[in-house]
Amino acid sequence: MTAECLTISSRSAGRARLARERIPAAREALRNCRLCAHACGVNRFEGTTGICRAGAEARVFSAQIEVSDELEIIPTFAVAFSGCDLRCAFCITGAESWNPSAGKPLNEQQLSIDASIAVRKGARSIMILGGEPTIHLPSVLRCVSVLPEDVPLIWKTNGHASKEARELLAGLFDLWLVDYKFGNDGCALRLAHVSDYTRVVRENLLWAANEGALLVRHLIMPGHVDCCWRPVAQWLASELPGVKVNMRTGFWPGWQAGRHAELQSCVTSDEAKQAKMISAEYDLNLVE
Amino acid sequence: MKPKQDPVELMSELLVMPDGQIYVHNLTPEMAAVLSELNPEDKTIARRVITHVNKDVKKLLPPGWHTKDSSS
């Protein structure tokens, strides 16, 4: 285990109160939902849904201690909200991530108890993720308002949030863990049905870098080293020099990956080597 | 009489490749311990182990399988 670990910042003190104060505004935002960059504008209280298909109430499909994330944050108590605003064909948890009806209704009081138990068992951080948690901001804030304040809180996101969502999240999390998935808009549109991806994710990354600690993840996909990883690495080196980057090579062809010819296998050893060479070329600050 | 509690549901997903490589998603401490027990030389997993395999799980391993002391 690395000696380096995530520390609690001063923002942790008072974050429960801050989250509580923002719940009404976040609930109101669901009436004309623009929490993610799709900006569907639907009223989620009236049964109309946008691309994420989520209503007003959130559900959770997993809440457990996990050790598969970055060494500096594990063991983490990972709370996964159901539903997502992206449609990545290769999503490993697609059945739950794409379905906002998966899992159980959020019970933030029970979650708070479970989180405290997890911390006693050795968890040293709490991670809010999905699916994509941005689409459930009112519920997330309810959660944060009751979670233990003396544990680092991590926001794991696809980086597709709107400015409105970011303002509701400001100052609440000790670490933003952002998944920078695609290096160009063409791949993003084809594999995740999202347009204007590059501009949005970069806007979120630059904001998160100013917000506090930032860690960027990129999952190397077979056949996408040059078109996706290289531009991601190049941009990170240029715009966020020194930022922590976790380049992952453990892609597996899950969910609907089989619809795309190049995603029907794992990353080859040659591709993994090439990806590492690109990291070295741009002198990235890689973490595991 | 004690109220009946729901069993704790923990979930890890594994993909075992023909060449023996194992891909893991949502790795729990319990699964990390089992994987480390199966291949103690794997440093990637070893660094993620925070618990140990209990005796009941060890009974499932083949006779003579290398096991680490779990008495802690």
Image: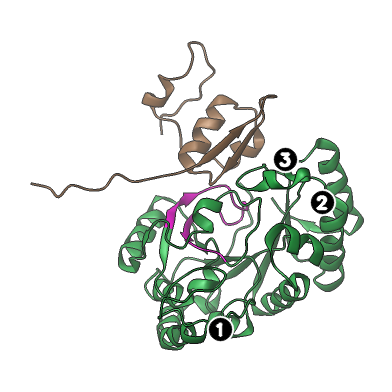
Chain colours: A green, B brown
Disc 1 to disc 2, how far (Cα)?
33 Å
Q: Amino acid at mark 2?
A: His
Q: Position of residue B37 (x, y in %)?
A: 53, 27
| Chain for numbered disc 2 | A
Residue at the disc numbered 2: A224
Q: Position of residue B9 (x, y in %)?
A: 37, 45
Q: Nearer the viewer, mark 2 or mark 3?
A: 3
Residue at the disc numbered 3: A264
Q: Amino acid at mark 3?
A: Gln
Near mark 2 (Cα within 10 A), the count class, few <14, some 14-19 or many ≥20, is some
Q: Which residues are magenta?
A: A61-84
Of A199 and A13, nearer the camera is A199
Q: Are marks 1 and 2 in contact (CB under 8 Å)?
A: no
Which residue is painted at 82% across and 51% down in the image? A224
Near mark 3 (Cα within 10 A), the count class, few <14, some 14-19 or many ≥20, is some
Disc 2 to disc 3, how far (Cα)?
13 Å
**Residue B15 marker:** none
